[in-house]
């Protein structure tokens, strides 16, 4: 439960335990909202495994999954309003819009074999990093931190979120399903190009790109994943991606130096 932990991390800088306790329901609300987005994501991606359990849409169907996701979103929203803090509510609403914008942008770029790294970074900043950033910033707001410290925590969450999503995208190729907790290769099956593949496309010879694209678009399942995994290892794009993630974690650590 990374997102509520980040809210409490931000709130923990306040010596006032009353303020910290007020952050607990808000921290839970972020996790509820995140769960709602995952349920809807699994419908879009036709994923069959989430946290080592069948997804809601697999178990009860897409109609039920849509309603459950909507219900959780509404419960999260009610909890944010109950905090009676206009800044917190405003930040959540803006972040929810940004997450949706990121998901829409990712959807419109499906099967785009010419996707550039810059646009990939914009997508993951919106759909993942913005929420982690909002979690830490919300904790800082509730703790009443000075603007400079609150901004540093906001940026910390943003850079952490970028690194988090890059590593998650690497695990989609290289992880183990029972450890990863969700369907391997689900991004590929959904037509989503992530950093390891974007880098691969930039490196493979022109005469091989069409072959790679045809495999990527195919419904070969495990055979497709194995083919792409071998190419990714051959061209070292996992190492490249993890190095990019490290640059973001380094930037995140630098932000914390502002804090006592």
Image (cartoon, rainbow, N blue to C red):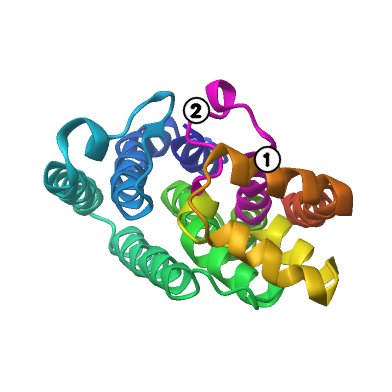
Point 52% across, 52% down: residue: 187
Q: Position of residue 117 (x, y in %)?
A: 70, 72
Q: What residue is pinned by disc 2?
A: 181
Asked which secondary structure carries label 2, the reply is loop
Q: Nearer the viewer, residue 120 or 222?
A: 222
Q: What residue is pinned by disc 1?
A: 226
Part of the protein shown in magenta = 161-186
Q: Nearer the viewer, residue 2 or 114?
A: 114
Point 30% across, 36% down: residue: 25
User: Which quarter of the image is occupied by the C terminus?
Assistant: top right
Asked which secondary structure carries label 1, the reply is helix
Q: Position of residue 112 (x, y in %)?
A: 56, 74
Main SS class of the magenta portion in the image: helix
Q: Position of residue 194 (x, y in %)?
A: 63, 59
Q: Nearer the viewer, residue 213 or 181?
A: 213
Q: Which mark is residue 189?
A: none
Q: Total marks drawn?
A: 2
Q: Nearer the viewer, residue 219 or 57?
A: 219
Q: Residues within 10 Å of mark 2 (few under 14, many from 20)?
A: some
Looking at the image, is 183 positioned above or below residue 129? above
């Amino acid at each position: 439960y990374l997102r509520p932990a980040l809210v409490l991390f931000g709130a923990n800088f306040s010596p006032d335990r009353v303020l910290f306790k007020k952050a607990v329901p808000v921290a839970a609300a972020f996790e509820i909202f995140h769960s709602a987005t995952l349920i809807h994501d699994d419908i879009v991606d036709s994923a069959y495994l989430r946290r080592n359990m069948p997804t809601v849409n697999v178990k009860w169907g897409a109609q039920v999954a849509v309603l459950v996701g909507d219900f959780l979103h509404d419960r999260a929203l009610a909890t944010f309003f109950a905090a009676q803090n206009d800044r917190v509510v405003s930040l959540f609403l803006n972040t929810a819009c940004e997450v949706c914008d990121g998901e829409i942008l990712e959807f419109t770029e499906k099967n785009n074999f010419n996707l550039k790294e810059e646009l990939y970074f914009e997508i993951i900043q919106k759909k993942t990093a913005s929420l982690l950033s909002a979690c830490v910033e919300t904790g800082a707001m509730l703790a009443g931190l000075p603007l400079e410290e609150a901004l540093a925590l906001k940026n910390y969450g943003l850079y952490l979120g970028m690194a988090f999503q890059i590593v998650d995208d690497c695990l989609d190729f290289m992880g183990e399903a029972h450890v990863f907790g969700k369907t391997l290769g689900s991004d590929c099956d959904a037509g989503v190009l992530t950093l390891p593949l974007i880098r691969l496309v930039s490196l493979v010879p022109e005469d091989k790109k069409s072959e790679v694209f045809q495999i990527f678009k195919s419904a070969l399942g495990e055979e497709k994943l194995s083919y792409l995994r071998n190419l990714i290892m051959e061209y070292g794009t996992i190492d490249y991606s993890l190095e990019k993630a490290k640059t973001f974690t380094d930037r995140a650590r630098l932000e914390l130096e502002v804090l006592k």
